[in-house]
Amino acid sequence: MPDLVVSITLFILALLIGIEVIGKVPATLHTPLMSGANSIHGIVIVGVVIVAAEAHSVLSYVFIFLAAVLGTMNVVGGYVVTDRMLEMFKSDKKANGKDGK
Amino acid sequence: MATTIDIVSWFVYLVSAVLFVMGLHCMNSPKTARRGNTISAVGMVIAVAMAFIKLFVEGFVSVVAVVVLIAGIAIGALAGVVSAKKVKMTDMPQLVSVFNTVGGGAAALVALNDILAQETPNLVVLITAGLGVLIGSVTFTGSLIAAGKLQGIRWVKKLSLPGKSVWNILFALLMVASLVMLCVFPGQRLLWSVLTTVFALCYGLVFVIPIGGADMPVVISVLNACTGTAVAMSGLAIDNVALIVAGALVGAAGVTLSVLMSKAMNRPLMSVLSGGFGSDASAASAGEGPQGTMKETSPDDLAVQLVYADKVIFVPGFGLAQAQAQRELADLGELLKEHGVEVEYAIHPVAGRMPGHMNVLLAEANVPYDELVDLDDVNPQFPSANVALVVGANDVTNPAARREGTPVSGMPILDVDKAQNVVVMKRGRGKGYAGIENELYFEPNTQMLFGDAKNSLQSVIAAVKELLA
């Protein structure tokens, strides 16, 4: 099964890239990083769409519906909340005086 | 033979995977971080759009499935946006944990569906999808409990588990055994996959329940890694490059962050996860804490100390988040800076309930990030500080950590006690999450200011303004 071999290779290489990239992120940004990484695993909705193509039983419908709700909530909410957090990070001291956005 | 659409979609998924990596890479500086998040969101949109295009080009078995799918996505998107927009910055850790819960649940459902829907699933599908079900289910209940603990829901916090290691081992064995049975007897896959799910859900509960609130940042990060892995496993099962790469990235992020944080606490990751801290064992030894008297001070007195200081270091902790006093603290800092006092914020890596929690809170209050100083850089500065103002931080300032034999031993701390004067704002006389008394409070140069941090800071600001007028 060469497909699986390729997939596992991809998995391991992606792990290494992940470790390399994340290691460079400063502690200041760890919360947005975690929240951002959290929204990336919402990619599972791509998987939901793929399995939906072959679904034909009531049980599958239920699974797909639940997975779609949960996955989308994860991905959409995750990006919005990360953006909200990052919006607040400013280095400009002049911007300090005015409160709020 | 691969069809054109297969090849096109492969490359589109690859593009989105590359965008995820670029997005994460941009997170290494606050200047580019927001763009990074957008890049990663674009990658997500591309991947989902591709999945839909492929769905409609290749056709689908049932219209109901597609309707259900689109309805689910609409509802999920709405719920996600509303909760993300409404949440207060102080409640961020819970929300991230909730999103992790739903992500793990979704991954488990995809994998479960894959096992059940196929006529004759092969061994590869059984193993990978089985692992997806197992890890996803563990994350689902685990993150749910973590979110409950962070939210401070009383009955969740009160949950305790006598003989926790027995339960942990029991459910771990049961879920692995069910998974093995699933792979050996694919004929009875309904039974074994349901059992795997149930035991994994139970394991998630017994895994997180014994872990104390102070260790939640590490737990969330580990669970995040688990969801990533579950997604990657689902990706292996349905052979999709986007899921594999994105899942692996998140897994790597989660593991790296967990390791960084346990290093910051100077405790091995495994000891954090086995829940030694803030549990019954350490609370019992709390009786023989330091004795002595705490000196109390008043907001007016503190204002005088602050105004006549050359250098002040603020030490924020979870109490600041709880009291939602970040704006007041920033206002006080601003006021003192205008008066010519040097102000810095000392950030302990595990202050708060999430890695970098304090940074986010203070950023919300418009504190420039270059005034936030890390543990290693700020510690040499304490001796030269006239006043160290501790707001709602406890265990991370406890000098007992320098000695052997206390629950916090070995944890790197902020050397607050080396400042000339220390003022601690604290809600009550209670103990920190480690369940021990903080020796700092009994030092001769320490003064206590009891009360809600927000109210105390407001009185201090008023008093400072009066002095400067």
Image (cartoon, rainbow, N blue to C red):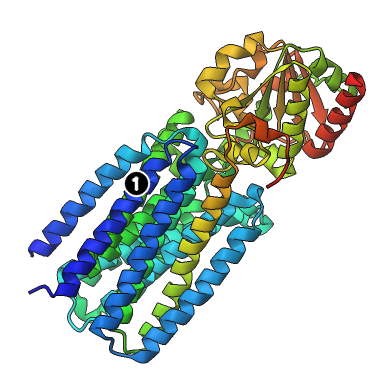
In the rendered structure, the answer to whether residue B11 lies left or right of residue B279 reads: left
Q: Residues within 10 Å of mark 1 (few under 14, many from 20)?
A: some
Q: Position of residue B270 (x, y in %)?
A: 39, 40
Disc 1 residue type (three-letter): Met
The image shows residue B52 at horizontal and vertical percentages of: 33, 76
Residue at numbered disc 1: B22
Q: Is residue B156 above or below residue B380?
A: below
Q: Residue at x 38, y 61 (%)?
A: B44
Residue at image location 54% in from the left, 34% down from the top: B350
* B226 shown above or below B191: above
Q: Quadrant of the N terminus of chain A?
A: bottom left
In the rendered structure, the answer to whether residue B192 lies left or right of residue B459 reads left
Q: Residue at 78%, 26% (x, y): give it.
A: B335
Question: Residue B328: percent from the left, percent from the top?
Answer: 77, 36
Label 1: element kind: helix
Residue B451 visible, this angle: yes
Question: How many marks overall?
Answer: 1
The residue under the point 31% across, 85% down is A55
Depth check, front residue: B360 or B125: B360
Residue A22: quadrant of the picture: top left
The answer to whether residue B203 is visible is: no
Q: Chain of mark 1?
A: B
Q: Position of residue B88 (x, y in %)?
A: 66, 52
Reply above or below: A60 against B449.
Answer: below
The residue at the far front in this view is A94
